[in-house]
Image (spheres, helix red, strand yellow):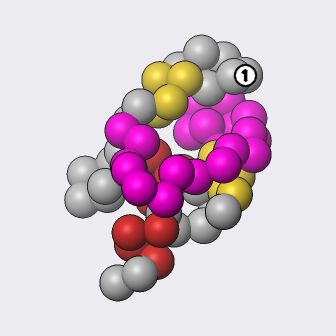
Amino acid sequence: MESNLKCPECGHLEKLEMPTDQCIFFHPCSGCGTVLKPLPGDCCVFCSFGDVACPPKAAE
């Protein structure tokens, strides 16, 4: 499953493959280098900045 992550700092969009067996807590933006971290209440960067919910959240 893929999701487009949008950096809140520079607006860069990056298409990434989401792992189905783990949550990704940190991801460096390939546009500006900002390290993306989940927002409070979210389990991973895909839930906070992606256009598709991560597999564990989608299963709920």
The reply to whether the magenta stretch includes residue 58 is: no
Question: Residue reaching furthest bottom?
Answer: 60
Q: Which of the 4 quarters of the picture holds residue 47?
A: bottom left
* In front of the other: 22 or 44: 22
Q: Residues within 10 Å of mark 1 (few under 14, many from 20)?
A: few
Q: State the predominant SS element of the stretch in magenta.
A: loop
Residue for point 72% across, 22% down: 31
Q: Which of the 4 quarters of the picture holds residue 10?
A: top right
Residue 44 point in image, percent of width and height: 38, 50
Question: Residue reaching furthest left?
Answer: 41
Question: Residue reaching furthest top?
Answer: 33
Quarter of the image with the N terminus in it? bottom right
Residue 54 point in image, percent of width and height: 48, 63
The residue that disc 1 covers is 31
Q: Secondary structure at mark 1?
A: loop
Question: Residue reaching furthest front?
Answer: 21
Residue 6 point in image, percent of width and height: 65, 45
Q: Is residue 19 left or right of residue 60?
A: right
Residue for point 24% across, 59% down: 41
The reply to whether the magenta stretch includes residue 9 is: yes
Q: Is residue 59 above or below residue 51?
A: below
The amino acid type of the residue labelled 1 equals Gly
Q: Is residue 54 left or right of residue 44?
A: right
What span is colored magenta in the figure?
Answer: 6-25
Q: Is residue 10 left or right of residue 25?
A: right
Q: Is residue 37 above or below residue 48?
A: above
Quarter of the image with the C terminus in it? bottom left
Q: Is residue 55 left or right of residue 11?
A: left
Residue 32 point in image, percent of width and height: 66, 17
Residue for point 31% across, 55% down: 43
Residue for point 60% across, 67% down: 52
Q: How many marks?
A: 1
